[in-house]
């Protein structure tokens, strides 16, 4: 896994002229907004990839809990449902 770095790299981003003009008029930092949007998209893509990669194990665990209940359920203080 690559080491996290705070080093910035230049890239080109294409925006509509209207959005760019509005952002500038409002004093918005387009680079910071783009960075945050890309970071969120990466986080979601990684979460989706993990869920897809582990879907079988998750389903097996759910089926086991459905059949046998949760472990230590008899010691649970707050009962749900």
Image (tube, grey):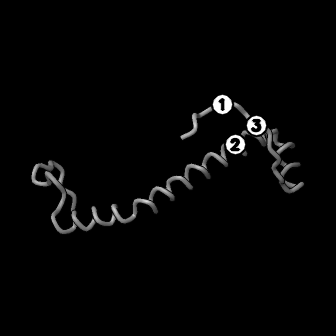
Q: Is residue 25 above or below residue 53?
A: above
Closer to us: mark 3 or mark 2? Answer: 3
Q: Which mark is residue 29?
A: none
Q: How far apart are the alpha carbons under marks 3 and 2?
A: 11 Å
Residue at the image point whose x is 25% and y is 68% from the top: 63
Q: Nearer the viewer, residue 2 or 65?
A: 2
Q: Is residue 20 above or below residue 28?
A: below
Q: Residue 9 carries which label?
A: 3
Report which quarter residue 16 is drawn in: bottom right
- How many neighbours does mark 2 have within 10 angstroms: few (below 14), some (14-19), or many (20 or more)? few
Q: Earlier in the sequence, mark 2 or mark 1?
A: 1
Location of residue 14 in the rendering, given as x and y in whole percent from the top left corner: 83, 53
* Residue that label 1 marks: 6
Location of residue 2 in the rendering, given as x and y in whole percent from the top left corner: 58, 38
Residue at the image point whose x is 66% and y is 43% from the top: 36
Element type at marker 1?
loop
Report which quarter residue 44 is drawn in: bottom right
- How many neighbours does mark 1 have within 10 angstroms: few (below 14), some (14-19), or many (20 or more)? few
Residue at the image point whose x is 11% and y is 49% from the top: 75
Element type at marker 2?
helix
Instruction: Name the image quarter holding the C terminus.
Output: bottom left
* Residue that label 2 marks: 35
Q: Which of marks 3 and 2 is nearer the N terminus?
A: 3
Report which quarter residue 31 is drawn in: top right
Element type at marker 3?
loop
Location of residue 41 in the rendering, given as x and y in whole percent from the top left corner: 62, 52
Q: Nearer the viewer, residue 66 or 46?
A: 46
Q: Nearer the viewer, residue 18 or 53?
A: 53
């Amino acid at each position: 896994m690559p080491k996290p770095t705070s080093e910035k790299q230049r890239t080109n981003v294409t925006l509509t002229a209207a959005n760019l003009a509005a952002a500038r008029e409002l004093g918005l930092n387009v680079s910071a907004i783009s960075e945050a949007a890309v970071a969120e998209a990466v986080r979601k893509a990684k979460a989706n990839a993990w869920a897809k990669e582990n879907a079988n194990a998750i389903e097996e665990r759910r089926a086991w809990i459905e059949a046998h209940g949760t472990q230590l359920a008899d010691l649970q203080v707050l009962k749900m449902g």
